[in-house]
Image (cartoon, coloured by chain):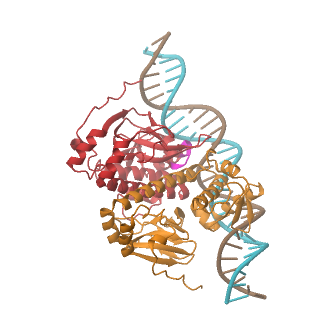
Chain colours: A red, B orange, C brown, D cyan
DNA sequence: CGGACACTTGAGTATCTTCAACGACCGTGG
DNA sequence: CCACGGTCGTTGAAGATACTCAAGTGTCCG
């Protein structure tokens, strides 16, 4: 086993990579000082569980770096991913003391955690936080609803194409963009995790990725590195309205 | 065609049936007075469209009575319902001026609408509204995620059982409850609308309802009226954790 | 009575899953 | 160094589930 990821003891909010996208985005300098009081960092290695569904959770948090997933599991083991958390995304729910989902680090992960009670108190005093959280939650709700369309109505091939398109857009939104055409990205998920996200089996995921590759929609370099020669063509395969390929 | 549903010109918020559940739930008397200034009622007949996806929307609203649906449609006509709006549920998004989904009245419907701009201004002045909206949005997000599990991983039979269970719970939450066992309810949706909700075809919906009836899980009286002899048995069929049959 | 609408049921088929075997990669330990 | 086991991924064959197409029922309403 690798050494545990280093614990970052402290970091100034001003230098934080997610300063302008996270729940604290609208906070002024004074409010940041208050947040610094109640925050602490936690690191997780790829594969580690952050919390289990039903566990007591005495903090809320922002993803600083890395990727985490939210999953639900049925008694017989069927699993569905219900959220993919990228840097700046928020975890936990003010006003609830137990986790509703399993949270798992799929890459090495650093989270900026706030003790729950002080955070809730601060939300009442500090409208900026609640406002930003509302905005982020509404965005997540939109994303969830788009995902419902995918889960309910898209074919396996369309699901895979959609997933790749979504990852491409999110990478772009995080500023990793090069040009719009001949886009390149790394799949941050195993085939199994993709299957859990898409409501498929891992075999079907594998087959459809192979099919998209054979049809020239994507180019694979290794198992995880993907090049998209023609993004519009990918969007067609995804069944999305081809209009803008824009970020939400 | 029937006469249009009567337009309710005005109603005191104090007498409103959703006073304590809607976005205005936490408002004090003074705040209600301000809301009365910017509110108006709109009525729709069963089947009417409230707004089309992409349409300009200069109001946000609460469902007062009746049921509405949010649906998304793909270019080739495939449809997925992404929200079922019951009394007290909120429609529209502050900060966005176009509808993201089709909103349709499935029963006669009365909505309490707020002009968007004044409502947004008031949200800034009145934390109670934003707080309540955040709470409601988080609840909707949880519901959407539960629905993702259903869409991605449940069988047709489980989907139908889940839908019936959810409607039963929502009826109970709205106070239509009798006893917990030998529960009775009306399906507020056509087979087609159920199919759109569940990510199935209407034929599969019909077949699975028949199957649940033959197996004694439900008793049908007409097409829409359902009796549930044993709610726990229904929950088993739904694949849900059988623990509490509780509201959320 | 006839038509529209919501729903049911049947037969054949497509899609995706299940079960199974196998390949590539990687760190470990003899 | 290489064999070993583990994880991750690919591919094939058979089978189950839900879809498509089609016909038909029941009810409401003009």
- Residue B51 lies, in percent from the top left, at 46, 73
Does residue B126 appear to the left or right of A210 in the view shown?
A: left
Tell me if residue A63 is in the magenta stretch.
no
Tell me if I can see residue A228 in this picture.
no
Q: Is residue A200 magenta?
A: yes
In the image, residue A133 lies at what x, y percent?
Answer: 35, 53
Q: What stretch is highlighted in magenta?
A: A198-204
Depicted D7 relative to depicted A15: above or below:
above
Residue A169 location, x and y as percent?
36, 53
Q: Can residue B135 be seen in this view?
A: yes
How many discs appear? 0
- Residue at 51% x, 40% y: name it: A54
Position of residue A56 in the picture relative to residue A66 (left or right) = right
Q: Residue at x 58, y 63 (%)?
A: B196
Whole-percent x, y for residue A207 in the image: 53, 45
Considering the image in quadrants, where does the N terminus of chain B appear?
A: bottom right
Q: Give left or right: position of A174 versus D9.
A: left
- Quadrant for residue C6, please give it: bottom right
User: In front: A122, or A109?
Assistant: A122
- Comparing A168 with B216, the one in front is B216
Q: In this view, does B44 lie above or below A112?
A: below
- Residue at (46%, 53%) from the top-left corner? A161
């Amino acid at each position: 086993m690798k050494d545990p990821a280093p614990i970052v003891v402290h970091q100034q909010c001003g230098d934080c990579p997610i300063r302008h996208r996270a729940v604290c985005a609208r906070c002024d300098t004074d409010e940041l000082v208050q947040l610094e009081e109640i925050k602490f960092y936690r690191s997780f290695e790829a594969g580690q569980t952050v919390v289990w569904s039903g566990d007591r959770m005495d903090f809320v948090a922002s993803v600083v770096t890395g990727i985490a997933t939210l999953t639900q599991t049925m008694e017989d083991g069927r699993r569905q991913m219900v959220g993919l958390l990228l840097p700046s995304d928020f975890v936990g729910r003010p006003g609830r003391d137990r986790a509703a989902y399993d949270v798992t680090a799929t890459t090495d992960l650093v989270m900026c955690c706030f003790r729950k009670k002080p955070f809730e108190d601060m939300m009442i005093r500090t409208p900026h936080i609640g406002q930003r959280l509302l905005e982020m939650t509404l965005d997540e709700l939109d994303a969830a609803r788009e995902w419902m369309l995918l889960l309910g109505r898209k074919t396996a091939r369309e699901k895979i194409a959609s997933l790749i398109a979504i990852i491409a857009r999110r990478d772009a939104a995080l500023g990793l963009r090069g040009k719009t055409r001949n886009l390149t990205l790394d799949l941050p998920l195993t085939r199994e995790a993709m299957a859990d996200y898409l409501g498929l089996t891992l075999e079907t995921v594998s087959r459809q990725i192979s099919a998209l590759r054979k049809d020239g929609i994507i180019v694979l370099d290794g198992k995880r590195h993907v090049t998209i020669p023609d993004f519009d063509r990918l969007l067609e395969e995804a069944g999305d309205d081809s209009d803008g390929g824009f970020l939400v």
